[in-house]
């Protein structure tokens, strides 16, 4: 009995695991007290949604904080998740539209980072350790071919591709369309 009881993970966090909603409890609430996501969404068109996200990101209050977070190394996908989930819980869009907004929101964050001059932003956590993003032999110093060759003032000769290499239909299109396009540019 003199043994000291070991604290579990809930006690360490100060959380009571038995103080949670009963399964199905949300179905018993009054229809007059619906949550925002239980009502029809404010936006149904993804273009309207991304415009709302753009206005939210670029507002005078949000933009400096957003740029600071990107500069501190917070992954862009985390920022996109927070913004999109916040919009869903506020009833701005449905979960389906939220999934459609992931890619444009990431591109928007990348553009904001580039505009702010942040070139080393983190796209997602663990990006530097991801084997899919590692470029093989990226640590090799490139060879400068200009140092080894003597300086000649000759222009490189461009060879016309042979008919064996390119299919005849493509060659026919090049021979018929290219002169017309070149003549239009000269005019």
Image (tube, rainbow, N blue to C red):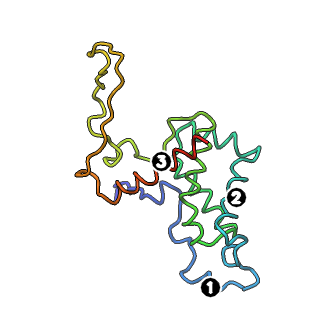
Residue 65: x %, y % from top left: 67, 41
Point 47% across, 47% down: residue:
179
Within-10-Å neighbours for mark 2: few <14, some 14–19, many 20+: few
Secondary structure of residue under mark 2: helix
The foreground one among 126 and 8 is 126
Residue 85: x %, y % from top left: 60, 62
Q: CA distance from mark 3 to mark 2?
A: 44 Å
Quarter of the image that includes the C terminus: top right
Left or right of 39? Residue 84 is left
Secondary structure of residue under mark 1: helix
The foreground one among 55 and 62 is 55
Residue 98: x %, y % from top left: 59, 66
Residue 76: x %, y % from top left: 54, 48
**Residue position marked by numbered label 1 in the rendering:** 27
Point 59% across, 48% down: residue:
109
Nearest-to-viewer mark from 1 and 3: 3
> Which residue sits furthest left?
164
Among numbered discs 2 and 1, the one appearing first in the sequence: 1
* Residue 44 to residue 80: above or below: below
Q: CA distance from mark 1 to mark 3?
A: 71 Å
Nearest-to-viewer mark from 2 and 1: 2
Q: CA distance from mark 2 to mark 1?
A: 33 Å
Q: Residue 51: which numbered mark, if any?
A: 2
Quarter of the image that includes the N terminus: bottom left
Left or right of 148? Residue 76 is right
Determine which quarter of the picture holds residue 8: bottom left
Within-10-Å neighbours for mark 1: few <14, some 14–19, many 20+: few
Among numbered discs 1 and 3, the one appearing first in the sequence: 1
Within-10-Å neighbours for mark 3: few <14, some 14–19, many 20+: few
Nearest-to-viewer mark from 3 and 2: 3
Among numbered discs 3 and 2, the one appearing first in the sequence: 2
**Residue position marked by numbered label 3 in the rendering:** 179
């Amino acid at each position: 009995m003199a043994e000291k009881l070991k604290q579990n993970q809930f006690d360490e966090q100060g959380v009571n695991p038995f103080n949670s909603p009963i399964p199905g409890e949300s179905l018993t609430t009054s229809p007059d007290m619906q949550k925002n996501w239980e009502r029809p969404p404010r936006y149904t068109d993804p273009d309207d949604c991304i415009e709302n996200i753009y206005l939210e990101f670029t507002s005078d209050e949000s933009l400096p904080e957003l740029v600071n977070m990107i500069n501190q190394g917070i992954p862009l996908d985390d920022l996109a998740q927070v913004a999109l989930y916040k919009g869903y819980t506020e009833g701005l869009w449905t979960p389906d539209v939220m999934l459609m907004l992931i890619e444009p929101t990431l591109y928007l964050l990348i553009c904001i980072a580039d505009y702010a001059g942040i070139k080393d932003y983190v796209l997602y956590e663990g990006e530097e350790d991801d084997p899919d993003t590692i470029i093989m032999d990226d640590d090799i110093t490139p060879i400068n071919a200009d140092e080894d060759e003597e300086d000649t003032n000759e222009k490189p000769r461009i060879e016309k591709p042979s008919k064996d290499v390119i299919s005849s239909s493509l060659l026919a299109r090049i021979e018929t369309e290219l002169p017309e396009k070149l003549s239009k540019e000269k005019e």
